[in-house]
Image (cartoon, helix red, strand yellow):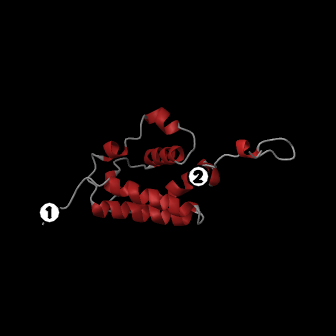
Amino acid sequence: MSDDRNEHGSNERATQRDVTVYEYVGGTPFFETLVEHFYAGVAQDPLLRPMYPEADLAAAKARLTGFLVQYWGGPADYSAQRGHPRLRMRHAPFPVDRAARDAWFAHMSDAVAQSGADDVVAPMLLDYFTQAATAMINVFDAPM
C-alpha cells in the first residue's frame, strides 16, 4: 500500500479539494456582471420585458444573482431568504413558450460571452442555462 505523504509529512490528497465554479470565477462579482449583461438585453426585449412587472429590474437582478451564486457553489443566502428555488413553480405564472425560452437563452448566451467566462466555465454555464431555460417552458404548441 502506498503512502501519499509528501516530504513534509502531510497527505496532499487529504488537503486537496475541488474548486467550485463560484470560486473559480472569482465569486459574486462575476455573477453580478453576468446578470447585469443579461438584464440589459431583457430590458429591451418586447417579449420578455413584460414578464417583469417591476419598473426597476433591481429586485429581479438580485434574485437571479443570489440564485446563481448559490447554485454554482457560493453562499446559500438565496435559500435562506427565499426558501427552496422551485424554479418551475416561481415561473408558472408567466407564459413561457419556445419563443420566450429562446429569447431568454439568447440574452443569457450573450451575457456569458460578455462576462469574461473562459473556455472551462462558459460551456458549463451554457449547458446549465440551456437545460434550465427549456425546463421553464409551460406553454406548448397545440398538436397538429
Identify the mark at residue 21; answer none if there is no mark. 2
Q: Which of disc 2 and disc 1 is earlier in sequence?
A: 2
Q: Is residue 117 shown above or below 26?
A: below
Q: Is residue 120 left or right of residue 46?
A: right
Q: Secondary structure at mark 2?
A: helix
Which residue is under mark 1? 143
Percent across and percent down for residue 139 are: 23, 55
Q: In the image, residue 23 lies at what x, y percent?
A: 63, 49
Q: Which of these two is toward me, 118 or 19?
A: 19
Callout 1: SS: loop
Q: Position of residue 103 (x, y in %)?
A: 36, 64
Residue 47 visible in the current orientation: no
- Asked if residue 65 lies left or right of residue 135, the reply is right
Task: Pick whichever, 79 or 123, lies toward us.
Answer: 123
Q: Dot 2 surroundings within 10 Å: few (below 14), some, or many (20 or more)?
A: some
Q: Is residue 133 visible?
A: yes
Q: Which residue is found at the position 52% from the left and 43% from the top? A: 70
Quarter of the picture containing the N terminus is top right
Q: Amino acid at mark 2?
A: Val
